[in-house]
Amino acid sequence: MNNAGSAPPALAVRGLSKTYVHRNPLAGKRIAVHALQDIDLDLKPGKTLAIVGASGSGKSTLARCIAGLEAPTSGEIRIGELKLSAAVAHRHVQMVFQDPGASLNPRFSVQTALREPLAVLPGWRPDSFNISDHLRQVGLSISVANRLTAKLSGGQKARLALARALIALGAGAGPAILILDESLTSLDLSVRAQMINLLVDLQERRALSYILITHDLDLAAHMGDEIAVMSAGKIVERRALPPHA
Amino acid sequence: MLKRYLLRRLLHVIFLLASVSVLAFLLLTLAPGDFLGEAKLNPQLSASTLAALRQRYGLNKSLPQKYLYWIESTARGDLGVSFAYDLPVSVLVWPRAFKTLQLSITALAFSWFLAVPLGVWSAAARRTLPDRILSALTSTLVAIPELALACLFLLVVVRSGAFHSSSPVLPVAILVLGALPILVRHVRAALLEAANQPFASAARANGIRGRQLWFGWLLPAAANPLTSLFGLSVAGLISSSLVVEVFLGWPGLGPLFLEAIAARDLYLVIGPVMLSAVFLSLGTLLADVLLYALDPRIRIES
């Protein structure tokens, strides 16, 4: 928690809480579900925080709050020096979802999917976009550029989802945080290993910060610099992991 | 590729129309009585006159013979002969079909032009007070039969004298109010389903929000079920139109159809049945072409 004397965190979360209120119209009652309670965490540039915990412990809610997809009930999220807003989240935080294939619009071609993060940038022109560089970066060939995303293999979809997230992060200067929300779970073993190597390599080259949400403790130990264990909406344990071999 | 797709769909339509015509002939012939049923009770008509009339109308022919006669007559463009009017059916039904289409197409256009923005707005504003009010309104409208709506409108119009009976405003308004609530609810549900897909979350994470997200990302994703619904709404509006026409005295196919059924005027019943089937097939064909144009996955698969 103490960052004095070291690089400023790419991500700082303070006192973050998220409560969902469900109404039961028959009973006339409101049921409050405390998905996140008073979460504090920091993530330094170029480091990986692995978050583990049982299903329903609040991992994905935390990820969605950091990515700006859910509004927290209370608390603060800062990305570098900036307070989190929709515009800040879009430029500095990206998420690769649990099923990377389903996170791609099945009606889009690979090219259109890659341009999605840039569609909202003011003054952006399609001709200023070199698609082959972005595809090569994640090990995809330019030959897939005009194919529909629905027609790609599972591994290709995962790489494309990663490429799209990297494009969004590359659009602005400053911290770049990639949230991997069980993103590798749906992949078969060999594709998964390739994706892990790709992620490690990209982190070294681009100083990306990863939040790795997983059930897989071996993966957490392999990729993480620090591990946080969540239970019932709280971080119950945090510890630094030994440097990777 | 589109040609092959259209050809396949066209073959389906021809098969459907052939089946409808056979079924319509079967059901009408199996039902007891015929056009001369009431004439039999008339003591002024002798048995020989009745037999001559039966011969003249071809009522003593077998079902396959009647069907063949109808096919020949349809090939000539006559669609058979009306016993009651002593005129080719086509002369009677075409002007009235035009009137029915005038109502149905206008109502179809208004319903969809209103349903899409209302459905999108309602999905985007889900669980807020305006959405709940709209949902309550659409539920109420779904629960009111079109005939009750027509009664209510007729009452208002008669009291106020606002519309002339030849004005299409009243029947179109009733048809739109009948179709709109179902369409709005379907558009809302289809968009909410699309909004819950992971690719919608990804688009939001990429900064795509508001109108751009709902109209540019989610509406195309929800287009498939809605396009199929478009085909069905054509059928719904045509059948509702027939009922509303009878009620409001609109000179469309509805009143003629009802009159023909009551008189057991065989070919004059078959005419509107077949025309409705043709309009319905054209509606679904249009929906299929739209689906082909809107969804790149269907284009590639076919």
Image (tube, coloured by chain):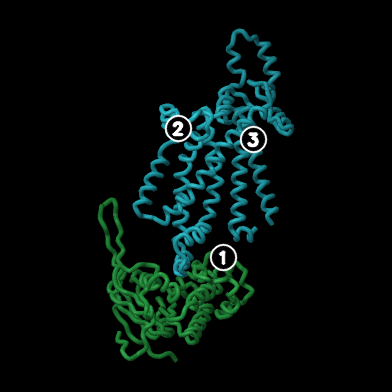
Chain colours: A green, B cyan
Q: Give, as a three-letter code, the residue at label 1.
A: Phe
Which residue is at 59% across, 56% downward?
B294
Q: Position of residue A73 (x, y in %)?
A: 30, 67
| Circle on res. B117 | none
Q: Is residue B24 above or below residue A27?
A: above
- The quadrant of the picture occupied by the N terminus of chain B is bottom right
Q: What chain letter is assigned to the residue under label 3?
A: B
Image quadrant of residue B262? Answer: top right
Q: A190 and A92: which one is in front?
A: A92
Furthest-top residue in this view: B44
Q: Nearer the viewer, mark 3 or mark 2?
A: 2
Q: What chain letter is assigned to the residue under label 2?
A: B
| Circle on res. B21 | 3
Image quadrant of residue A143? Answer: bottom right
Q: Nearer the viewer, mark 3 or mark 1?
A: 1
Q: Give, as a three-letter code, the residue at label 3.
A: Ser
Q: CA distance from mark 3 to mark 1?
A: 43 Å
Q: Secondary structure at mark 1?
A: loop
Q: Is residue B150 above or below residue B126?
A: above
Determine crowd level at label 1: few under 14, some 14-19, many 20+ residues with C-alpha closer than 10 A.
many
| Circle on res. A108 | 1
Q: Give, as a three-letter code, the residue at label 2.
A: Ala
On whether disc 3 and disc 2 are found on a single subunit, the reply is yes
Q: CA distance from mark 1 to mark 2?
A: 45 Å
Dot 2 corresponds to which residue? B150
